[in-house]
Amino acid sequence: MLIAIALALALQTTLARFIVGGTTALDLVLVVVTYVALTSGPVTGMLAGSLAGIIQDALSSGVVGIGGLAKSIVGFLAGAIGQQFIVTAALPRLVMFLGATALHAAVFMGLYVLLGLRAFPSPWTAIASQALGNAAVGLIAFAIIESLPGMAERRRMQKRH
Amino acid sequence: MALLDIRQRIGYLFIAVTIGHIILISAQVNTNRGIPILEAVTFGVFAEVQRAASSAIGGMQTSWTDYVALQQVRTENEQLQKEISQIRVGLQQERALAQRSRTLEQLLDLRTQAVDLTTVAANVIAGGASPDFRTITVDKGTADGLRPDMAVIAPAGVVGRIITPSARAAKVQLLIDRNAAAGALVERSRAQGVAEGSGGDLRLNYVSGTADIQVGDTVVTSGIDGIYPKGFVIGQIQSVQRGAGVFDTIVLRPAVDFSSIEAVLVVTTAPVAVDEEAAPQ
């Protein structure tokens, strides 16, 4: 989990250089938190979200804790839903990633607006594009990770024959 | 066993984590002057990781481009690009100097103000950690004389300002960040306003309803904010929406391509306070 979060942060800061001027912006850390929550449950999802969010806050210029709170809520709820419902097909996972991004944006932006620290005039396009981007990356990540054991098994079988 | 027990009480754990975050947030909001220690320490440590990652990636890129690709052409091209960048920065300084001279000549109270800027060159080593904040990290810090609120410029124009310097790196808030703003004026008509970031582009706000504004006008820094030196290009006016006697929305196209910044200059000279009110319109 820690390695995945560190990797996501490293990739996020590297990729952000190239997409900083555009309107599309992925949140790879949120993708990792949602993935961990869906595969490991609400407690691990919440702790992963809390840790990853706080680190992300500290590296950004915002208030440390707002991103942590948003991601811990997302991690907890995603994990709880993942335990209650079957989310192994692509469509439910897509909905989970879209919902996770929307919830994260609502809590994150809501807290900033509530505390009077930042304004987010008409953020809908940015949230929608980020949700689609996160969902695409999340689904691809799931597909790759789940294909790895099968791929190894197939190679072993081919060598035997 | 203790971990097992706490996992069985998920609800309590969730409430505890939430309260912990709220306390953390409240502490910072109440004491919002200066940089939080957690942020400074984490940034300082992670900047070293970013530097190492950037060096590793840079090393691989250099190996590929310099040895696999056309080595001589690439090297020559880089040298020429550097020379062009230096010339463009010089041109901007000259332009600022010329503009200032024209304004000063029109003032009754003629004052001489130096526009020679001392700058420190820095390389961009990372982008922002969160997509909600438009920042970059550069490889120079307090050890190189960088301080908070120093202006950061590129050959094409204004980039942003230093917000969190550590010993060997510094975080730069880009001008397109939602919290960023700079005193601005339209070069042609001398109409004043404030250029504010909106997350992706720039808006020119607080412009008088009677001001002469046209699409394509160049907008430069006015120098009245005490951060950015006067006369540096912010961008060009992309669109103007006029309401009843006031400007509804003036959108600027930034002069700098923020997605391809690789090197910047940090202005270490404190800007001279400019009283634009005294200048004839």
Image (cartoon, grey):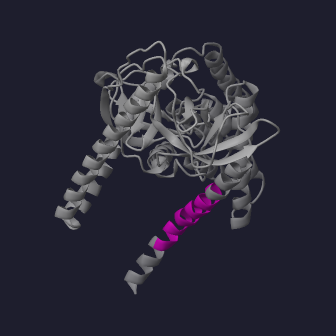
The magenta segment: A134-151
**Quarter the C terminus of chain B occupies:** top right
Residue under the image location 65 percent in, 18 percent down: B29
Position of residue A63 in the picture relative to residue B84 (left or right): right
B240, A70: nearer the viewer: B240
Position of residue A99 in the picture relative to residue B67 (left or right): right
Question: Is residue B80 shown in magenta?
Answer: no
Position of residue B244 in the picture relative to residue B134 (left or right): right
* Residue at the outermost bottom position: A161
Does residue B45 appear anywhere in the picture? no
* Residue at the outermost left position: B72
Assign the magenta stretch its main secondary structure.
Answer: helix
Position of residue B26 in the picture relative to residue B261 (left or right): right
Q: Is residue A86 above or below residue B119?
A: below
Residue under the image location 37 percent in, 41 percent down: B124
Residue under the image location 69 percent in, 49 percent down: A127
- Percent across and percent down for residue A142 are 59, 61
Query: Which of the 4 quarters of the picture holds residue B246?
Result: top right
Q: Is residue B135 above or below residue B25?
A: below
**Quarter the N terminus of chain B occupies:** top right
Does residue A21 appear anywhere in the picture? yes
Q: Is residue B21 above or below residue A13?
A: above
Question: Is residue A148 shown in magenta?
Answer: yes
Q: How many marks?
A: 0
A71, B90: nearer the viewer: B90
